[in-house]
Image (cartoon, grey):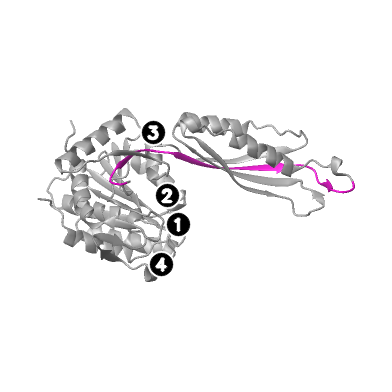
Amino acid sequence: MSRFSMDALLPELEALVVRESPSDDASAVSALAHHIVARLRAAGVHAEARPCPPRGDAVLATVGGGAGGRLLLGHHDTVWPRGTLAEIPFRVEDGRVRGPGVFDMKAGIAVAIAVLEDLARRESPPAVTLLLTPDEELGTEASRSLLLEVARAHREVLVLEPSLGGAAKVARKGAASFALTFTGRAAHAGLDPERGASALLELAHCTLFADALARSDAGTTVTPTVGQAGNRTNVVPDRARLSVDCRVWTRAEAERVEAALSAYEPRDARVSVALEGGFHRPPLEPTPAATALYERARSIAAELGFDLAAARVGGASDGNLTAAAGVPTLDGLGPIGDGAHARDEWVLAADLVRRAELLARLVDGHGSE
């Protein structure tokens, strides 16, 4: 019989969902952070809000000393603007919980709160920390230094992002955004176009160059997404800008693409090019330690009566950052559901209890040597 109950977890989740927390509304994100801090303190957990300007406050909570133990990681910002709750209210229908942010990722937060509350009742709980970032949906720029500092003080990271069809996420693609700016020479398009050096033509050449860097066999995508040039129909454009999105499974592929774009040489020597941006999310690659962590979680899940499969996904999370920092990381431990960033997102109510039990046994060190 589980130590956790649906009767406790559903109200916990509702309290999180009804407090809307859009990423671009720092006051709303901070208000939810303070609610979580107060909730944890009431349960006997040491908890505090950490400002991450210009975004909202992060949540940092510990039991058993925290440092050196296991880190539970998540985020409390969502993609949904304030007022969405009126259109998509919190509700439970046919065993599915609905509401803005319920899947990504307030259900995972509810599970984490339940586990910390359970640990706080013990005389000698294991060392566990919870960190919730306020800007994950925007790239975790404001909270990145805090995230890396906290992660490096722990031996492993358990990410409460939602599972993919029940599977844990053992690999995530790294993500990059590049911008290339081309500077040429303007000229009259009718009188003396030959005197011009077209930034637009160079953008076109570079677009084809970037597209050719993709490698389907390695799962690498390099996608030119936005091109801008010129402002007069009778002028050879002297300025252009190209945006490129890139996704990779491995650090080696990230380095290959970045080096290639950095080394791009314009066809027209009169046009100069400047590269900005890079990989804001390095790939989460499987390591022996991370694989052992997954196998332990899979064994615990089997004891609880369900299969915890392993999935590789294209989307990135804060787990990409902790894995790249060298801390064994297992992602996708949140409840089953679907519809991330979609109006019909949902979480399976029955999975809340099961995921809480799995997480509790993981932080207890169950199944480890």
The front one of 285 and 275 is 285
Instruction: Assign a secondary structure to mark 1.
Output: loop
Q: Closer to the N terminus: mark 2 or mark 1?
A: 1
Q: Report the span colored magenta.
A: 165-191
Report the mark closest to the observer, 1 or 4.
4
Q: Residue at x 23, y 61 (%)?
A: 10
The answer to whether any part of residue 64 appears in the image is: no
The front one of 21 and 245 is 245
Q: Which mark is residue 55?
A: 1
Q: Are marks 2 and 1 in contact (CB under 8 Å)?
A: yes
Q: Which residue is mark 2?
A: 143
Residue at the front extreme, as displayed:
94
Q: Residue at x 39, y 57 (%)?
A: 77
Q: Which residue is mark 4?
A: 84
Q: How many marks?
A: 4
Mark 3 is on which residue type? Answer: Glu
Report the mark closest to the observer, 2 or 3.
3
Residue 200 drawn at (x, y percent): 72, 44
The answer to whether any part of residue 110 appears in the image is: yes
Q: Closer to the N terminus: mark 4 or mark 3?
A: 4
Q: Closer to the N terminus: mark 2 or mark 3?
A: 2
Q: Closer to the N terminus: mark 4 or mark 2?
A: 4
Q: Residue at x 44, y 61 (%)?
A: 26
Report the mark closest to the observer, 3 or 1.
3
Instruction: Assign a secondary structure to mark 4.
Output: helix
The answer to which quarter of the image holds residue 264 is: top right
Mark 4 is on which residue type? Answer: Thr
Q: Is residue 229 above or below residue 152?
A: below
Q: Which mark is residue 285?
A: 3
User: Dot 2: within a 10 Å radius of its alpha carbon, few (fewer than 14), some, or many (20 or more) residues?
Assistant: many
Cα gap from disc 3 to disc 1, whole angstroms: 29 Å
Mark 2 is on which residue type? Answer: Ser
